[in-house]
Amino acid sequence: MSIRQLEKHTNSDMARLIVGDAFDALDEVDDKSIQLSVTSPPYNIGKPYERDAPMSLPKYLEWLTPIIEKLCAKIKDGGSICWQVGNFVRDGEVFPLDFFFYDIFTKQGFKLRNRIIWRFNFGLHATKRLSGRYETLLWFTKSDTYTFNLDPIRVPQLYPGKKHSSKKGEGKAGQPSGNPLGKNPSDFWTFSAEEMFKNQPIWDIPNVKANHPEHTPHPCQFPHELAERCVLAFTNEGDTVLDPFSGAGTTAIAALKAERRAVAIDKSAEYVALTKQRVSELYEGRIKLRRSGTEVAQPQKTLTVAKTPVAWTGAK
């Protein structure tokens, strides 16, 4: 890796790890010093790292609103926020959190550029509604002038041989009409760009479960590639990326790996220590990350677990 080794890996000019409540700890970050914030706030569903007890939806939004207001002040004029959320569920009723957060961010003058959907195959199974298998990432910018690097996140062209017609080509008739670097992936992204873009054009990113190479003790960890794509698209080398709810440090790892600076905040000293450990593993070349762009694995039909049980079919 071309980044120089961190002095003790953390709390240097490249990585800054802060233990503290997000609202208070954000005071330690200078206003307009952050190019990008990528984060996934607690969903208020009773996870161990959340508050003592689940709150009502109004109380939950009341708690996060002043944190968002403070976070927005930390973003540079040309910077962005990627706010990754799922759904708030109470008594079987679903409340799409992105709907509620939209108003909070736009009141701070931010503009929504994309509402990005990513899907995963595994999760909790519902019994009285369809099982949830997607979450939403909202990309907000602070102004109309912002960083957007399309080339690092392009996907292969579906029809690379398509050419300009004589009517619309304006002197380019017969020449390839697409970009040789690839196509804009739109707001539905995939792990395997070529295969999934053709057959199922959505962000098909497996969530971090027990057998995932990035799995840590954190109970609700989002995948490295989700953060990496945001970092590559919305920042340049040397920019600073902030996560006020850093958890297992996924955003910080993505930032440092891409030669950006990282600020990670978490109220849990245990998770900050975990992030420090993972940063050390990154610079020592020992961290386990799922390679970005890898196709989501499909079970082999010959495996016993992929076969229909005899008990279901009644076959002898």
Image (cartoon, helix red, strand yellow):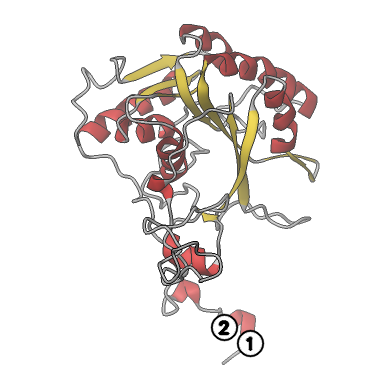
Categorize mark 1 by other alpha carbons within 10 Å: few (<14), some (14-19), many (20+).
few
Depth check, front residue: 104 or 246: 104
Rounded to the nearest angstrom, the CA distance separating label 2 from label 1 is: 6 Å
**What number is the disc on residue 310?**
2
x and y percent of residue 88 in the render? 72, 38
Going by the image, does 248 lie left or right of 108? Answer: left
Q: Secondary structure at mark 2?
A: helix
Q: Secondary structure at mark 1?
A: loop
x and y percent of residue 111 in the render? 65, 30
Residue highlighted by disc 1: 314
Depth check, front residue: 261 or 96: 261
The answer to the question of whether label 2 and label 1 lie on touching residues, with beta carbons closer than 8 A, is yes
Depth check, front residue: 228 or 130: 228
Categorize mark 2 by other alpha carbons within 10 Å: few (<14), some (14-19), many (20+).
few
- Quadrant containing the C terminus is bottom right
Residue at coordinates 42% horizontally, 48% vertically from top-left?
A: 153
Residue at coordinates 63% horizontally, 85% vertically from top-left?
A: 313
Going by the image, does 122 lie left or right of 103? Answer: left
x and y percent of residue 247 in the render? 47, 29
Residue at coordinates 49% horizontally, 56% vertically from top-left?
A: 190
x and y percent of residue 14 in the render? 30, 20
Residue type (three-letter) at the residue carrying disc 2: Val
- Quadrant containing the N terminus is top left
